[in-house]
Image: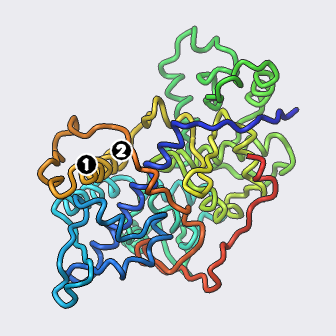
Amino acid sequence: MQKVRLKWVKNRGLDHLIERTTSIRASCLLLDHLARLPTTSPVPARSLARLQKPLGLTVPVLRFLRRHPTLFAEELHPRFPTLPSFSLTSASHTLLARLADASARDAHLRLARLLLLTRSRSLPLASILPLRFDLGLPFNFATAFPSNHPGTFAVANNRISLLSASGLPDDIAVSSLQRRHAAAIDAATYRALSRPPSSSSAPLAFPMRFPRGYGGMKKVKAWMEEFHRLPYISPYDDASGIDPDSDIYEKRNVGLLHELLGLTVHKMVRRNAIRLLREELGLPHRFTRLFTRYPGVFYLSLKCKTTTVVLREGYERGKLVEQHPLAAVRDKVHYVMRTGVLYRGKGLSKLVLDDDGAEEDGALDGDEEFQGDGMDEDVDVECFGMEIVDDDGTPEYEEDEGDSDV
């Protein structure tokens, strides 16, 4: 299959969504961390300063806390009155309860599908840790899932394994592309079935949303038609008998990354988090080239001082096409954050958490202040749920060769 090299095109709308999600990530992780502290006294801000990098903030933690008084209330510490200290507001406790409830609905199914994508049906806990927010996993998933589903999950030697899929839904090992195709067959019309293979509604064809100017290029159309004619290999099927250098294996990898991004709550994930799973998923060393080679499926962003991959089909006009209940609650977190920025000390009196119509979409001007450095380095951080120590302070992985092309 002849490959076409396409130039990377910036998408401001998706970049803005990445900035917004980065600020929500920082708030949710910080709320979770403060809620789990054993003390009932306000927490000094200087004890949280070391969390700046893991939270993905480019501003000091103290400034971030003070900027959102509707989430974090500044109080006097009983023993150290001169130290700026913070506690959770009533709105924060309400949001934490809603986040836990929304996450508990199907978090174990997303983790089970992730484990089914791997070769050994198991992953190190340290590899899942950076994906905890993306997959919507609870803080104690490593102990809660094996105890709640004893015949399904098990943890040993700092690895979590999928023992059996018998207690899970029948379609647990069916990809989202296959489920969409089955649904289309059920409601198919003659016109839908007669569309060409390049159509997003054709059987097992990846939905394509090219950057402006690419969709009409003849060479791109011809390339994608040839790509769609290749047999589709489900990412949950064994691919050990396929030549790793073949076009079919490349399409299998595209389908695997498509499924992985589809498992996330916000249909986006940082590239370095995928790197931790590369060997278990059977991805090539330079897997980033798949994102740049198929810009109709993926969008590669350099925002927030890290590289983030977004599933293009997951968003329509700046909103999630299929919004998970957890994403809806996280939108409420963002609404509370913005209310605190607008009204400062009077923000709590302006909140309307029970009226969805009062929560406007979009981000407040100045959200770029919350851009992070991507949490590319492993740090000893309790707010992530377990310890990962990197003594020399250097990133575990170097940049892929050729990644600078984007």
The kind of residue on which mark 1 rests is Leu
| Residue at the far front in the pictured view | 82
Q: Secondary structure at mark 2?
A: loop
Looking at the picture, tell me which residue is in the foreground, 349 or 150: 349
Q: Residues within 10 Å of mark 2 (few under 14, many from 20)?
A: some
The residue sitting at 39% across, 55% down in the picture is 24
Q: Is residue 223 visible?
A: yes
Vertical arrangement, residue 72 with respect to residue 306, above or below: below
Q: Residues within 10 Å of mark 1 (few under 14, many from 20)?
A: some
Vertical arrangement, residue 321 with respect to residue 249, above or below: above
Is 82 displayed left or right of 169 in the figure?
Answer: left
Q: Which mark is residue 306?
A: none
The N terminus appears in which quarter of the rendering?
top right
- Residue 325 percent coordinates (x, y): 33, 46
For label 1, the residue is: 342
- Residue 214 percent coordinates (x, y): 71, 25
Q: Which mark is residue 364?
A: 2
Residue 365 in which image quadrant: top left
- Residue 46 percent coordinates (x, y): 36, 81
The kind of residue on which mark 2 rests is Leu
Residue 198 in which image quadrant: top right
